[in-house]
Image (tube, rainbow, N blue to C red):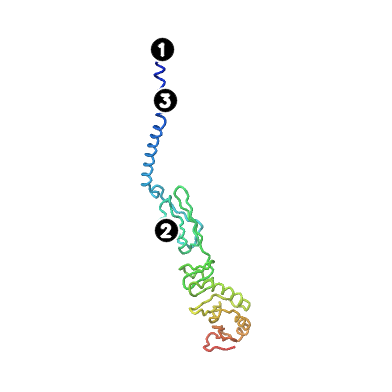
Amino acid sequence: MNARRNNRATRRAPQPARLKVLAGPGLRLLAGMALAGVLVLVAAAWVQFDPEAVVPIGQVEIVGDPQHADVAAIREQALHRVPGFVGADLERLRDELEAMPWVDSAQLRRRWPDTLEIRITEPVPVAQWGEDRLVDRHGRLFGPVALEEWSFLPALSGQDGRQVVLMQRYLEVSARLADAGFEVTGLEEGRRHEWTIHLADGAKVLMGRDDDLARLGRLVHAAPAIRTQRDAPVARIDLRYPHGMAVAWAGEAAEDRR
């Protein structure tokens, strides 16, 4: 009996070794093949994945309380450029929005699950420019706009690119003439850089092409005499002379030299 049991034990002994061999390289091979199959399926699914179809933009919310920007046009541009929530090119959309009238800056933010939030900051106008544009606080031109709403701003006119120079000159001229009681409403510069000062009472001050403001001292000094010499309002003051000025009153064709 003992001999038979020993023979049976001897025959069963190699079995754990076979199982160990099967659990080694063979099992790892099967696992690797299964993982490869899963990766193939994932890759095939990703090729067919359309982020815009899976997660479309449900709404575009405009914040920042814009008063003049075209909110409908901003929303339409956003939906056209970014129809999908995933993979949206927000930097390109921001650049496009900031190129639109009355948009100084645009900040974009995704809000799950389907909202694109756009915060609009409008430019701050500091002057009128020409017939239908404005100058913002950074010296940039934007428009067209209806200038009637902005008639309280100084009216500047000249070639594009000269707005910063004329705005600075306007501030200097206004400060210089305020001591003599003159209110400056705007500046106009021609193609040859000859420039004219416009006063609130309708008078014009001709300055020529010289940007030296020292000659305004002659006008400040002569202001009391100019106001008392005629009952009619002054139409034009010509400061293009080296050492004097010419004054024309309303209704007079001749110029008086001083």
Instruction: Find disc 1 in the rendering and name its residue.
Output: 3
Q: Is residue 25 above or below residue 107?
A: above
Quadrant in which residue 18 is drawn: top left
Instruction: Find disc 2 in the rendering and name its residue.
Output: 77
Where in the figure is residue 255, as x and y percent of width and height? 54, 88
Closer-to-camera residue (82/232): 82
Q: Amino acid at mark 1?
A: Ala
Rate crowding at label 1 as few (under 14), some (14 to 19) or many (20 or more) other CA atoms within 10 Å: few
Rate crowding at label 2 as few (under 14), some (14 to 19) or many (20 or more) other CA atoms within 10 Å: some
Which label is found at residue 186? none
Instruction: Find disc 3 in the rendering and name its residue.
Output: 17
Rate crowding at label 3 as few (under 14), some (14 to 19) or many (20 or more) other CA atoms within 10 Å: few
Q: Is residue 12 above or below residue 31?
A: above
Sequence-wise first label, 1 or 3:
1
- Answer with left or right where residue 81 lies relative to residue 128: left
Residue at (39, 35) in percent of width and height? 29
Q: Distance from label 3 to label 2 (Cα)?
A: 71 Å
Q: Is residue 30 above or below residue 170?
A: above
Q: Distance from label 1 to label 3 (Cα)?
A: 24 Å
Mark 1 element type: helix
Quadrant in which residue 218 is drawn: bottom right
Between label 1 and label 2, give the one nearer the viewer: 1
Sequence-wise first label, 3 or 2:
3
- Answer with left or right where residue 34 lies relative to residue 66: left
| Quadrant assignment for the N terminus | top left
Q: Amino acid at mark 2?
A: Gln
Q: Amino acid at mark 3?
A: Ala
Q: Distance from label 1 to label 2 (Cα)?
A: 92 Å
